[in-house]
Structures are given as structure tokens and as C-alpha cells.
Amino acid sequence: MLEITGIGGIILLILDIWAIISVVGSGATTGKKVLWVVLVLLLPLLGFILWLLFGPRSGRA
């Protein structure tokens, strides 16, 4: 199992917080927002990568 500690863990935490804030601020439906937040919380690294590739974007251009 992959274990992330030290500076890598802090960086991943910051990226996950950024992803969650972006999801909450997006124009997606409430159900999709909840699913993305749960995915990022339960699978921090994989969830972040999936959000980065497929997740909802904020309204900013």
C-alpha cells in the first residue's frame, strides 16, 4: 500500500483541499458535488487525479 508522509503528505493535503474548494464552487449539481468530495476524501491521491482529469470546473474562464 502506498504511504505518503512528510512533505508529500502536506502537499497532497493542500491539493485535496484545493480540489474540494473547486468542486464546491463549481456549477455542478449538489449530488455530483457530494460524490466528488467523498471521492477526494476517501481516495486522496486517486481522487485528486480523477478530479483533475474529469471533475467539474468552477465558473471561471
Image (cartoon, rainbow, N blue to C red):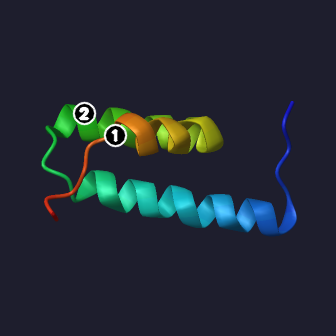
Question: Quarter of the image containing the C terminus?
Answer: bottom left
Asked if marks 2 and 1 touch (Cβ < 8 Å), the reply is no
Q: CA distance from mark 2 to mark 1?
A: 9 Å
35 in relation to 24, above or below: above
SS assignment at label 2: helix
- Picture residue at 20% right of the left edge, 53% below the top: 26
- Picture residue at 22% right of the left edge, 59% below the top: 25
- Picture residue at 21% right of the left edge, 32% below the top: 31
Q: Amino acid at mark 2?
A: Lys
| Structural crowding at the residue carrying mark 2, measured as other residues with C-alpha within 10 Å and reported as few (<14), some (14–19) or many (≥20) | some
**In the current view of this chain or complex, which residue is farthest to the front?**
61
54 on left or right of 25: right
61 in relation to 23, above or below: below
Give the number of the disc on residue 55.
1
> Which of label 2 and label 1 is nearer to you?
1
| Structural crowding at the residue carrying mark 1, measured as other residues with C-alpha within 10 Å and reported as few (<14), some (14–19) or many (≥20) | some
Residue 29 place in picture, x, y as percent: 14, 37
Residue 46 place in picture, x, y as percent: 60, 35
40 on left or right of 33: right
Question: Quarter of the image containing the N terminus?
Answer: top right
Residue assigned mark 2: 32
Residue 51 place in picture, x, y as percent: 42, 41
In the rendered structure, which disc, 2 or 1, sits on the residue that comes first in sequence? 2
